[in-house]
Image (cartoon, grey):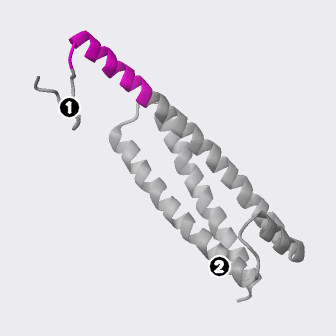
Amino acid sequence: MSHIDALLQCVDAQSELLNDFIQVLEAENALLLETPSNEALGSLTVRKNDYARRLGELDQARTTILTDMEQPDNAAGIEAVCALHPDLRSAFDGLFEQVAQASTLNQSNGQILKTFMEHNQQALDTLRSLMGQELYDARGRLSKK
């Protein structure tokens, strides 16, 4: 298999996996906008971590192929390869669009989670001030004071 074929196959695999990852991020977003259960969020987190691991493996494979082609795995290297092999352009453009979409969704979900955490912390702070003592110890259990 030529380097170009291997690179195209790698980018196509990344795009397919990113599409699945985006679906998980969208499911996470919908769940976060409802009243999420810890179990459901935990399940999605496990799936997201698996996708991140697999995408990392494909990133490394792409880096290896580009290195074998004497190009860096960055914008300049990809541009150089696409200039020599224009048939790769649409695959990389699609991949970059998916990466941007996944990044936006992941940031949005992170902001929602941050807001939940801040709200929970404010509720605990209010309870502490009303009780005049620490309600929970470092392990998250009711304080015995």
- Closest to the camera, between mark 2 and mark 1, is 1
Image point (46%, 61%), residue name: 50
Vertical order, 9 against 14 (above or below): below
Density class for disc 1 (Cα within 10 Å; few <14, some 14-19, many ≥20) is: few
User: Which residue is nearer to you in this view: 105 or 35?
Assistant: 105
Left or right, residue 68 beside residue 123: right
Where is residue 84, by image quadrant?
Answer: bottom right
User: Which residue is nearer to you in this view: 79 or 42?
Assistant: 79
**Quadrant, the C terminus:** top left
Density class for disc 2 (Cα within 10 Å; few <14, some 14-19, many ≥20) is: some
Vertical order, 69 against 118 (above or below): below
For the stretch drawn in magenta, the main secondary structure is: helix
Q: Secondary structure at mark 2?
A: helix
Image point (58%, 41%), residue name: 107
For the record, the magenta segment spans 117-133
User: Which residue is nearer to you in this view: 105 or 138?
Assistant: 138
Q: Amino acid at mark 2?
A: Thr
Q: Find the distance from the CA under tag 2 to the CA under tag 1.
A: 49 Å
Where is residue 6, by image quadrant?
Answer: bottom right
Q: Which mark is residue 137?
A: 1
Q: Amino acid at mark 1?
A: Asp
Task: Residue 125: say if magenta.
Answer: yes
The number of numbered badges drawn on the structure is 2
Pick out the residue farthest to the bottom: 1
Q: Position of residue 59 (x, y in %)?
A: 61, 68
Image point (33%, 19%), residue name: 125
**Quadrant, the N terminus:** bottom right
Residue ID for mark 2: 64
